[in-house]
Image (cartoon, rainbow, N blue to C red):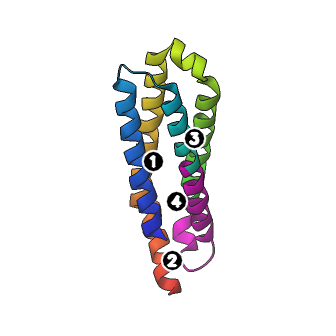
Amino acid sequence: MPTELIEDHHVLRGMMRDFASMMDDDVRDMALLTRWRIRFAQLFRDHMGREDMLARGLRQGPLAMEAEPVVHQHGRTMVALFLRYSDHIKQWTPAQIMADWDGYRRGTLGLQDMLYDHMEWEEAHLHPLIEGRVRRAA
Protein backbone atom coordinates (compact mmCIF):
# COMPACT_ATOMS: atom_id res chain seq x y z
CA MET A 1 0.00 0.00 0.00
CA PRO A 2 2.74 2.59 0.63
CA THR A 3 3.67 2.26 -3.06
CA GLU A 4 0.12 3.27 -3.96
CA LEU A 5 0.38 6.29 -1.66
CA ILE A 6 3.63 7.36 -3.32
CA GLU A 7 2.03 6.91 -6.74
CA ASP A 8 -0.88 9.09 -5.60
CA HIS A 9 1.59 11.77 -4.52
CA HIS A 10 3.33 11.57 -7.88
CA VAL A 11 0.03 12.03 -9.74
CA LEU A 12 -1.12 14.84 -7.41
CA ARG A 13 2.20 16.67 -7.85
CA GLY A 14 1.98 16.29 -11.62
CA MET A 15 -1.58 17.60 -11.66
CA MET A 16 -0.58 20.59 -9.54
CA ARG A 17 2.35 21.40 -11.85
CA ASP A 18 0.09 21.10 -14.90
CA PHE A 19 -2.52 23.30 -13.28
CA ALA A 20 0.04 25.95 -12.30
CA SER A 21 1.18 25.97 -15.92
CA MET A 22 -2.42 26.21 -17.12
CA MET A 23 -2.96 29.26 -14.91
CA ASP A 24 0.07 30.94 -16.52
CA ASP A 25 -1.53 30.70 -19.96
CA ASP A 26 -3.36 33.67 -21.38
CA VAL A 27 -6.15 31.35 -22.50
CA ARG A 28 -8.62 31.02 -19.66
CA ASP A 29 -10.52 27.85 -20.47
CA MET A 30 -13.11 27.51 -17.69
CA ALA A 31 -14.34 24.14 -19.01
CA LEU A 32 -10.84 22.69 -18.79
CA LEU A 33 -10.29 24.32 -15.40
CA THR A 34 -13.53 22.84 -14.08
CA ARG A 35 -12.69 19.34 -15.33
CA TRP A 36 -9.27 19.60 -13.74
CA ARG A 37 -10.70 20.79 -10.41
CA ILE A 38 -13.16 17.88 -10.32
CA ARG A 39 -10.52 15.30 -11.23
CA PHE A 40 -8.06 16.69 -8.68
CA ALA A 41 -10.70 16.79 -5.93
CA GLN A 42 -11.65 13.16 -6.60
CA LEU A 43 -8.05 11.94 -6.48
CA PHE A 44 -7.27 14.04 -3.41
CA ARG A 45 -10.35 12.70 -1.59
CA ASP A 46 -9.61 9.08 -2.54
CA HIS A 47 -5.97 9.44 -1.52
CA MET A 48 -6.90 11.01 1.82
CA GLY A 49 -9.23 8.10 2.54
CA ARG A 50 -6.58 5.46 1.79
CA GLU A 51 -3.89 7.26 3.71
CA ASP A 52 -6.13 8.01 6.69
CA MET A 53 -7.22 4.37 6.93
CA LEU A 54 -3.59 3.22 7.03
CA ALA A 55 -2.57 5.98 9.44
CA ARG A 56 -5.38 5.13 11.87
CA GLY A 57 -4.40 1.46 11.62
CA LEU A 58 -0.99 2.36 13.00
CA ARG A 59 -2.61 3.06 16.36
CA GLN A 60 -2.98 -0.68 16.87
CA GLY A 61 -0.07 -3.05 16.86
CA PRO A 62 3.64 -2.95 17.54
CA LEU A 63 4.27 0.58 16.23
CA ALA A 64 1.43 2.24 18.17
CA MET A 65 3.61 4.19 20.61
CA GLU A 66 5.99 5.41 17.94
CA ALA A 67 3.20 6.18 15.50
CA GLU A 68 0.79 8.08 17.76
CA PRO A 69 2.40 11.57 17.53
CA VAL A 70 2.90 11.17 13.77
CA VAL A 71 -0.68 9.98 13.21
CA HIS A 72 -1.98 12.81 15.40
CA GLN A 73 0.01 15.45 13.47
CA HIS A 74 -1.06 13.93 10.15
CA GLY A 75 -4.72 14.06 11.14
CA ARG A 76 -4.56 17.66 12.31
CA THR A 77 -2.76 18.81 9.19
CA MET A 78 -5.06 16.92 6.83
CA VAL A 79 -8.17 18.35 8.47
CA ALA A 80 -6.73 21.86 8.17
CA LEU A 81 -5.73 21.30 4.53
CA PHE A 82 -9.09 19.78 3.66
CA LEU A 83 -11.01 22.65 5.27
CA ARG A 84 -8.83 25.23 3.55
CA TYR A 85 -9.25 23.44 0.21
CA SER A 86 -13.04 23.26 0.71
CA ASP A 87 -13.19 26.98 1.50
CA HIS A 88 -11.06 27.69 -1.57
CA ILE A 89 -13.45 25.76 -3.83
CA LYS A 90 -16.49 27.51 -2.32
CA GLN A 91 -14.94 30.97 -2.61
CA TRP A 92 -13.62 30.59 -6.14
CA THR A 93 -16.67 30.06 -8.28
CA PRO A 94 -16.16 30.19 -12.06
CA ALA A 95 -17.48 33.77 -12.11
CA GLN A 96 -15.14 34.82 -9.28
CA ILE A 97 -12.18 33.14 -10.98
CA MET A 98 -12.81 35.06 -14.21
CA ALA A 99 -13.25 38.29 -12.27
CA ASP A 100 -9.97 37.87 -10.36
CA TRP A 101 -7.72 35.43 -12.22
CA ASP A 102 -4.56 36.67 -10.49
CA GLY A 103 -6.13 36.35 -7.03
CA TYR A 104 -7.30 32.83 -7.85
CA ARG A 105 -3.84 31.92 -9.12
CA ARG A 106 -2.15 33.25 -5.96
CA GLY A 107 -4.61 31.43 -3.71
CA THR A 108 -4.27 28.19 -5.63
CA LEU A 109 -0.48 28.27 -5.68
CA GLY A 110 -0.41 28.98 -1.92
CA LEU A 111 -2.65 25.99 -1.31
CA GLN A 112 -0.50 23.86 -3.60
CA ASP A 113 2.61 24.85 -1.63
CA MET A 114 0.97 23.65 1.57
CA LEU A 115 0.07 20.33 -0.03
CA TYR A 116 3.57 19.90 -1.50
CA ASP A 117 5.04 20.48 1.97
CA HIS A 118 2.64 18.05 3.62
CA MET A 119 3.28 15.30 1.08
CA GLU A 120 7.02 15.63 1.74
CA TRP A 121 6.34 15.39 5.48
CA GLU A 122 4.16 12.30 4.97
CA GLU A 123 6.85 10.61 2.90
CA ALA A 124 9.47 11.33 5.56
CA HIS A 125 7.44 10.54 8.69
CA LEU A 126 4.19 8.69 8.01
CA HIS A 127 4.96 6.41 5.09
CA PRO A 128 7.97 4.73 6.77
CA LEU A 129 5.72 3.79 9.69
CA ILE A 130 3.08 2.43 7.32
CA GLU A 131 5.73 0.48 5.44
CA GLY A 132 7.04 -0.93 8.74
CA ARG A 133 3.57 -2.06 9.74
CA VAL A 134 2.94 -3.71 6.38
CA ARG A 135 6.28 -5.56 6.55
CA ARG A 136 5.66 -6.73 10.14
CA ALA A 137 2.22 -8.04 9.17
CA ALA A 138 3.59 -10.05 6.23
- Type of residue at label 4? Val
- Does dot 1 land on a helix, a strand or a loop? helix
Q: Which of marks 4 and 1 is nearer the N terminus?
A: 4
- Type of residue at label 2? Arg
Q: Nearer the viewer, residue 109 or 133?
A: 109
Q: Residues within 10 Å of mark 1 (few under 14, many from 20)?
A: some
Estimate the spatial distance between the alpha carbons at disc 4 and disc 1, rounded to whole Å.
Answer: 12 Å
> Residue visible at 40% across and 59% down?
123
Vertical arrangement, residue 86 with respect to residue 135, above or below: above
> Residue visible at 48% across and 34% down?
111
Q: How crowded is mark 4: few (under 14 residues within 10 Å), some or many (20 or more)?
A: some
Return the x and y of residue 45 as percentages of the image width and height. 60, 50
Which residue is denoted by mark 1 in the rendering?
Answer: 118
Estimate the spatial distance between the alpha carbons at disc 2 and disc 4, rounded to whole Å.
Answer: 14 Å
Disc ID at residue 38? 3
Which residue is denoted by mark 2 in the rendering?
Answer: 133
Estimate the spatial distance between the alpha carbons at disc 1 and disc 3, rounded to whole Å.
Answer: 21 Å
Which residue is denoted by mark 4 in the rendering?
Answer: 70
Q: How crowded is mark 2: few (under 14 residues within 10 Å), some or many (20 or more)?
A: some
- Which mark is nearer the camera, 1 or 3? 3
Q: Nearer the viewer, residue 42 or 82?
A: 42
- Which mark is nearer the camera, 3 or 2? 3
Q: Which residue lies furthest to the bottom in this view?
A: 138
Mark 1 and mark 4 in contact (Cβ < 8 Å)? no
Disc ID at residue 90? none
Vertical arrangement, residue 48 with respect to residue 105, above or below: below
Vertical arrangement, residue 39 with respect to residue 47, above or below: above
- Type of residue at label 1? His
Give the magenta part as a residue range.
Answer: 43-70
Q: How crowded is mark 3: few (under 14 residues within 10 Å), some or many (20 or more)?
A: few
